[in-house]
Image: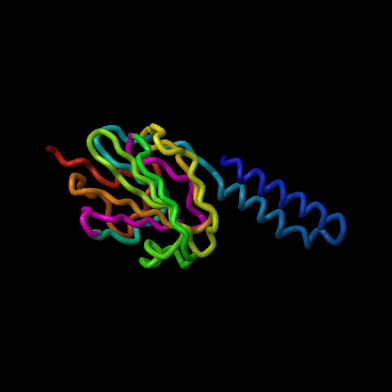
Amino acid sequence: MVIDGIYYALALSAGGAAVWYLTRPAFAAPLFLLALFCLYFFRDPNRVIPEGPVAVSPADGKVVGIRADGSECARISIFLNIFDVHVNRAPIAGRIAEVEYTRGHFLVASRDVASSENERNTVTIRGQGTSVRFAQIAGLIARRIVFTKKLGDQVAKGERVGLIKFGSRVDVFLGPEWEIAVKTGEHVSGGSTVLARRRQA
């Protein structure tokens, strides 16, 4: 459980208790339901991290697009709805080489234009002779991107590195040394689904 979920649930429950006391129990029900939803939304399950030269998904969600993106081999876009786990994980092991925050809009995250227009935090991880970039992208509801690591930190593959609150999107950028292992429309799990495998040299 992400600690934020407990804070939200406690605040909503306190509000529900006040409404219950001052008015009618029925009027407090929506606040208690929202408290329960926050506990569900901010869940943080453990995952089995695949071994070997693979890049794992940094987020739970649906693959909404795979395409060539400039000089890089591919961009894999993952849409997270409000029912997905929103904890983000490192796709590969390595060092946090770059972190770039970009202000932007809050368009619907499932749209392709969200990759370039929405608020986002782009992170580059370098390790074992390769690098992978991924962008935490805010959505229509999400207005809070959390990244818990610092520039220069070492991370393990599948390690928790942040969170995007409510509906959002994560884009993963892979170079030509990676062979894509997922398809558009597939549902992936952060830390455990293999997005790509390293090609043999």
Q: How is the image coloured?
A: rainbow
Q: Which residues are magenta?
A: 70-94
Q: Reply yes or no: does residue 90 show up in magenta.
A: yes
Q: Residue 114: x percent and y percent?
A: 40, 64
Q: Residue 156: x percent and y percent?
A: 37, 32
Q: Residue 17: x percent and y percent?
A: 80, 52
Q: Place residue 53 in its image quadrant.
A: top left
Q: Residue 33: x percent and y percent?
A: 67, 55
Quadrant into which the N terminus falls: top right
Residue at the image point whose x is 58% and y is 48% from the top = 40
Residue at the image point whose x is 66% and y is 49% from the top = 8
Q: Is residue 197 above or below residue 107?
A: above
Residue at the image point whose x is 61% and y is 45% from the top = 4
The answer to which of 129 and 39 lies nearer the viewer is 129
The answer to which of 101 and 16 lies nearer the viewer is 101
**Drawn side of residue 151 relative to residue 2, left or right:** left
Q: Is residue 66 above or below residue 160?
A: below
Quadrant into which the C terminus falls: top left
Q: Reply yes or no: does residue 176 show up in magenta.
A: no
The answer to which of 123 and 5 lies nearer the viewer is 123
Residue at the image point whose x is 37% and y is 56% from the top = 78
Residue at the extreme right of the image, as rendered: 22
